[in-house]
Image (tube, grey):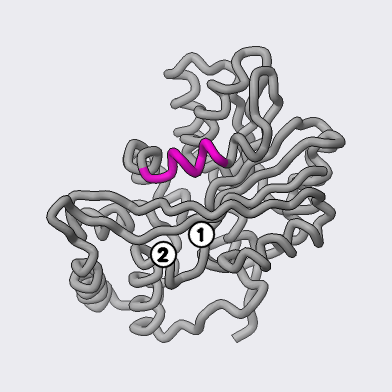
């Protein structure tokens, strides 16, 4: 079947509208899991006191709050996302934390270049870049939003074999739902998994001084059942893949996913294999 980018964006927006509350509720787990990579991303983007930062596909804004604490009130963080509901959680978190330097905008990540030009010292994206249908356009727009010398950094998954906590459910759902794997260039969780692909994507968009830092980031939870609950409640992409499956079969699939993930349970709890790249470049 031909990939329909318009339909994909429509369903992606809806999946994040539906998953927004759960993604926010699982915030502490997300920050524990992604905290070290987030710090590395902000370092790679050069975020510091007084920085003006653009957060692309920022979701509920955990990384945005961390960035805002770095910038202080002298700087600012603009959080964008395609989902207005998930942005409402980011704005609420900023307001409750007294981070007045955070503002939110409902903007498609591929439209960044038509919205801002040369205004930001840094741009970031945490697990968002991999899901853009026209990633090249998004990257060109992000680059143009930066001042000369400004830096962009993003967190992306490495290859599927290094991310079993996610690739096991994806593979099982894809098999049972009769879905083909994404073709090269199409969006998907592991679409920038190869370091060479990540480097090429940034260089082709005009970024200089491109770097890739690989980090081990295991997902630590009490059990495989907790991992399934986390993914079932907040990973909208999995629900998008299951949309054509009858409800009874969905329940059987989730049960089989839990069984498959039990191999990663240890005496200390569930240790889900996850490897991330922090990719970065300068304008």
**Magenta stretch?**
33-40
Task: Tell whether position 209 is magenta.
Answer: no
| Residue 202 on image: x %, y % | 74, 56
Q: Callout 1 environment at 10 Å: few (<14), some (14 to 19), or many (20+)?
A: many
Q: According to the image, label 1 marks what residue?
A: 157
Q: According to the image, label 2 marks what residue?
A: 163
| Residue sitting nearer the eye, 147 or 278 | 278
Q: Is residue 22 left or right of residue 55?
A: left
| Residue 157 on image: x %, y % | 51, 59
Residue at horizontal 45%, vertical 33%? 89
Chief SS of the magenta region: helix
Q: Secondary structure at mark 2?
A: loop
| Residue 170 on image: x %, y % | 39, 72
What numbered label is drawn on residue 99?
A: none
**The N terminus, quarter of image:** bottom right
Q: Earlier in the sequence, mark 2 or mark 1?
A: 1
């Amino acid at each position: 079947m031909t990939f329909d980018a318009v339909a994909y964006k429509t369903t992606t927006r809806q999946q994040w509208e539906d998953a927004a509350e759960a993604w926010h509720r699982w915030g502490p787990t997300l920050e524990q899991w992604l905290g070290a990579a987030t710090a590395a991303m902000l370092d790679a983007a050069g975020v510091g006191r007084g920085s003006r930062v653009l957060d692309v596909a920022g979701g509920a804004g955990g990384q945005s709050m961390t960035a805002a604490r770095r910038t202080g009130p002298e700087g600012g963080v603009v959080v964008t996302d395609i989902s207005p509901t998930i942005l409402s959680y980011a704005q609420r978190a900023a307001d409750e934390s007294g981070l007045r330097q955070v503002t939110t905008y409902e903007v498609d990540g591929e439209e960044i270049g038509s919205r801002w030009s040369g205004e930001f010292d840094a741009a970031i994206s945490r697990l968002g870049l991999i899901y853009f249908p026209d990633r090249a356009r998004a990257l060109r727009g992000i680059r143009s939003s930066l001042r000369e010398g400004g830096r962009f950094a993003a967190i992306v998954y490495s290859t599927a074999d290094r991310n079993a906590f996610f690739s096991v459910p994806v593979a099982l759902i894809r098999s049972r739902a009769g879905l083909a794997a994404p073709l090269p260039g199409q969006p998907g969780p592991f679409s920038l998994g190869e370091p060479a692909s990540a480097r090429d994507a940034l260089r082709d968009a005009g970024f200089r001084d491109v770097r890739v830092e690989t980090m081990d980031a295991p997902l630590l939870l009490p059990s495989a059942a907790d991992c399934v609950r986390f993914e079932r409640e907040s990973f909208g992409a999995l629900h998008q893949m299951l949309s054509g499956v009858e409800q009874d079969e969905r329940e059987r699939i989730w049960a089989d996913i839990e069984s498959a993930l039990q191999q990663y349970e240890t005496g200390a709890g569930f240790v889900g294999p996850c490897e991330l790249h922090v990719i970065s470049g300068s304008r």
